[in-house]
Amino acid sequence: MINKLVADIKKKEAPIVVGLDPTLKFVPDYIKKSAFAEYGANLKGASEAIWEYNKGIVDAVYDLVPAVKPQIAMYEQFGVDGLVAFKRTVDYCKEKGLTVIGDVKRGDIGSTSEAYAVGHLSGVEIEGKKFYGFDEDFATVNPYLGSDGIKPFLKVCKEENKGIFILVKTSNPSSGEFQDRLIDGKPLYEHVAIKVNEWAEEVMGDDYSYVGCVVGATYPEMGAAMRKVMPKSYILVPGYGAQGGKGEDLKAFFNEDGLGAIVNSSRGIIAAYQQEKYSSFGERGYAEASRAAVLDMKEDLKNALRK
């Protein structure tokens, strides 16, 4: 999938991933009222509203971006019905030709890690036939448990030609409490990056590895350093927009050819209609507002990479 992702980034000239991280406060009232009228003001109704909201955004932006990143927690909060909405979203995005990065941040060992990898990237065999669960193209993985937690994912990546993005330096303010701790003269995140580079060499695509990494846009000074440590890993960059990241901060995450990184924006795109800049679209134009936000982000990144 890394080859497809890179090809689509080139084709659409958009190193952008849309974070499909819905909450009910983002969903326009008319969508909620319709879903609640049919299914009730309950978990089922909320999940249906989330699905319809997602569908509208995907329909509006799929021709502009190469990938989406649904965050599973936003669906899990609605229980089993929420997970159905997650799966419907994954399937619909793939039908539209989008690469799907499952933001699941799994991290465990042994058979548990294997089950996570199988559930999200591969399938289970039942009576000699393989059935796929969530079936994303990539999954985010927490490396805190070491190689025991990563190797089952590497195995599935090799078998399925799918990929993972490993957390290296996250965008949240308190990430430094652990990630910046010095060990043998280097911050912990750099030790993780060195290990990511080793894992990346095991599962190579044409130019980049199936093993990518996550480095937050809120720490642009680390972009250049991490780019050198992990030259064959695509960098998934969260934190653009609502979390403070700007295009001008992100050039160091990219290689000279403009590849090597893909930038995520979640509520900055999916809830664009709630921002003053896009308020003229109104609730019923929420999807068109999302499209306008993508176009603005695309231009921002293009200008930044030209400098």
Image: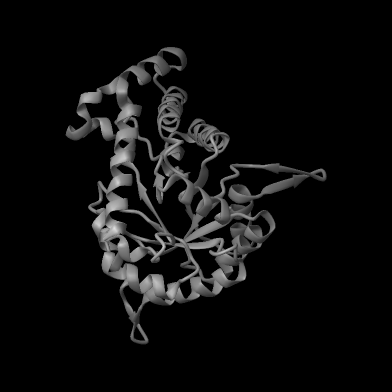
Q: Which picture quadrant has residue 206? A: bottom right
Q: Is residue 246 above or below residue 38?
A: below
- On the rendered structure, is 222 left or right of 258? left
Residue 284's x, y, as percent?
Answer: 31, 20
The type of colouring in the image is: one colour
- On the rendered structure, is 294 left or right of 114? left
Q: Viewer-proximal residue, 302 or 65? A: 302
Residue 240 visible in image? no
Residue 234's x, y, as percent?
Answer: 46, 61
Q: Viewer-proximal residue, 280 or 274? A: 280
Please tell me which residue is depicted at 42% across the width and 77% down the height of the picture. Answer: 191
Work out which quarter of the rendered image holds the C terminus and state it.
bottom left
- On the rendered structure, is 254 left or right of 300? right
Q: Which picture quadrant has residue 257? A: bottom left
Residue 24 visible in image? yes
- Kindly give the residue lying farthest to the bottom in the view shown: 184
Residue 251's x, y, as percent?
Answer: 31, 62
Q: Which picture quadrant has residue 92? A: top right
Q: Is residue 36 above or below residue 180?
A: above
Please tell me which residue is depicted at 62% across the width and 58% down the height of the picture. Answer: 157
Q: Is residue 102 above or below residue 110?
A: above
Please tell me which residue is depicted at 65% across the width and 58% down the height of the picture. Answer: 156
